[in-house]
Amino acid sequence: MLKHNLRVIRLQRWVLCCVLTLWPPIAWAGMGYVGDTEVNRRLVLSDSGRLRYEAISFFVVMLLLAALVIRWLWNRLAIDFTKLPRMTFGKAIGVVVLWGLLFLVVLTMIACTREMMTPGVWERQGLLYKIPTDASKGKP
């Protein structure tokens, strides 16, 4: 009976979070506006707001999918190795976030090392940083 009540409470919290996340009037902060007419009451995002919303949505979906895959792999492995504990979805999200932070630190260290080995040489060209040739700087 207690497990059933906990499941119902968790489901209610999940539904409440989904409703509050998708509720249009909450998206203030310069990201959009709600139409003034009664007939067309909907959220209209600016271009930058739409791009931010798409990027955040993609990040969250990929985080949840990665957590599902990690949880499935771990629990599948736990069938063969009985000493391994079962992994919950929350723990799987924690594992994915920690590994992501680890990769962020490692990639930051690589970028800093690249800059320290050749200080001030790298110039931004579009999305990437490249070492400019002498012709692009105007030198003979």
Image: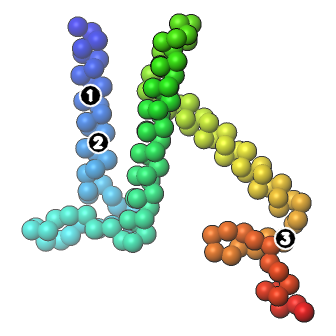
Q: Earlier in the sequence, mark 2 or mark 3?
A: 2
| Mark-to-mark CA distance, 2 and 1 | 11 Å
Residue located 13% across and 71% down the image: 37
In the picture, the disc for residue 11 is: 1
Outermost residue toward the left in this view: 39
Q: CB atoms at circles 2 and 3 under 8 Å apart?
A: no
User: x%, y% of residue 107?
Assistant: 71, 49
Label 1 packing within 10 angstroms: few (<14), some (14-19), many (20+) = few
User: x%, y% of residue 64?
Assistant: 43, 38
In the picture, the disc for residue 18 is: 2
**Residue type (three-letter) at the residue carrying disc 3:** Gly
Label 3 packing within 10 angstroms: few (<14), some (14-19), many (20+) = few
Residue located 88% across and 65% down the image: 118
Q: Earlier in the sequence, mark 2 or mark 1?
A: 1
Residue topped by disc 3:
120
Nearest the viewer among 69 and 53 is 69
